[in-house]
């Protein structure tokens, strides 16, 4: 399966879903605001109604800002999955350049924390940089946020620094198998996945 049709399929069929989700969340926000006003008015009395209304307006504005952010990222090619937005590149760069691209967008290379996230990243069926490296200390693999590697999906006999090469960066390579990670020289060019977690 080619990456471009896969991404197009996800966005073309998902556009109505995104609009429906944004509209639904917006309606829920309005309902929540009304309920909060009613509850706070009954709890604190009428003299505090103005303060309650100001607080509710602030909460509503913050929620609408988050909804707008959700819609903006979705339309810029980011895919929402399980609490994070992901950007799958169409071009290739080294691991360091890939990470820099993500960081310039307030994101970072993907950190895979679960079997579900592993399955999500394998869907793209490409060799893809992930946010895993042992550049600081050989053999001690860490994620780009500094957390140690706990959940592992290394391919068979990986990581292995094949033929004595300096392979300090992680990629998804064996996408036909759940155990798909591989260590690779960081200067090789791959596509990559950025991850941005937003508190929605």
Image (cartoon, helix red, strand yellow):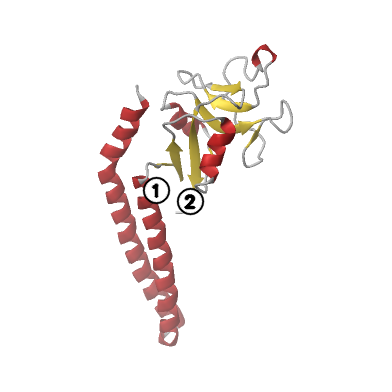
Q: Residue furthest right?
A: 137
Q: Which mark is residue 119?
A: none
Does 151 appear above or below 45?
above
Q: Is residue 112 visible?
A: no
- Residue 166 falls in which quadrant of the image? top right
Q: Which residue is mark 1?
A: 73
Does 135 appear above or below 22?
above
Q: Residue furthest top?
A: 163
Does 199 appear above or below 8?
below
Q: Earlier in the sequence, mark 1 or mark 2?
A: 1
> Where in the figure is residue 153, as x and y percent of width and height?
56, 25
Quarter that holds the C terminus: bottom left
Q: Which residue is mark 2?
A: 198
44 or 173: nearer the viewer: 173
SS type, badge 2: loop
- Residue 34 falls in which quadrant of the image? bottom left
Q: Do callouts 1 and 2 mark residues in contact (Cβ within 8 Å)?
A: yes
> Where in the figure is residue 175, as x and y percent of width and height?
47, 21
Q: Is residue 119 visible?
A: yes
> Where in the figure is residue 25, as x and y percent of width and height?
34, 56
61 or 129: nearer the viewer: 129
Instruction: Identify the residue at image location x=52%, y=49%.
Output: 106
Instruction: Identify the residue at image location x=45%, y=40%.
Output: 86
> Where in the figure is residue 187, as x and y percent of width and height?
60, 26
Does 197 appear above or below 91?
below
Q: Residues within 10 Å of mark 1 (few under 14, many from 20)?
A: some
Quarter that holds the N terminus: top left
Instruction: Identify the residue at image location x=41%, y=27%.
Output: 123
């Amino acid at each position: 399966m080619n990456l471009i049709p896969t991404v197009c399929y996800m966005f073309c069929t998902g556009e109505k879903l995104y609009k429906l989700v944004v509209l639904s969340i917006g309606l829920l926000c309005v309902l929540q605001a009304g309920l909060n006003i009613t509850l706070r008015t009954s709890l604190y009395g009428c003299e505090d109604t103005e303060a309650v209304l100001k607080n509710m307006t602030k909460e509503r504005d913050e929620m609408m800002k988050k909804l707008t952010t959700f819609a903006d990222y979705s339309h810029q090619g980011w895919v929402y999955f399980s609490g994070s937005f992901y950007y799958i590149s169409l071009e290739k760069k080294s691991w360091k350049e890939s990470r820099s691209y993500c960081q310039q967008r307030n994101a970072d290379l993907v950190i895979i924390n679960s079997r579900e996230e592993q399955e999500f990243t394998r869907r793209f069926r490409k060799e893809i940089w992930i946010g895993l490296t042992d550049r600081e200390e050989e053999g001690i693999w860490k994620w780009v946020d500094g957390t140690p590697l706990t959940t592992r999906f290394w391919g068979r006999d990986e990581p292995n620094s094949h033929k004595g090469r300096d392979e300090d960066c992680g990629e998804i390579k064996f996408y036909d198998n759940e155990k798909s990670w591989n260590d690779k020289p960081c200067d090789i060019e791959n596509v990559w996945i950025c991850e941005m977690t937003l508190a929605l």
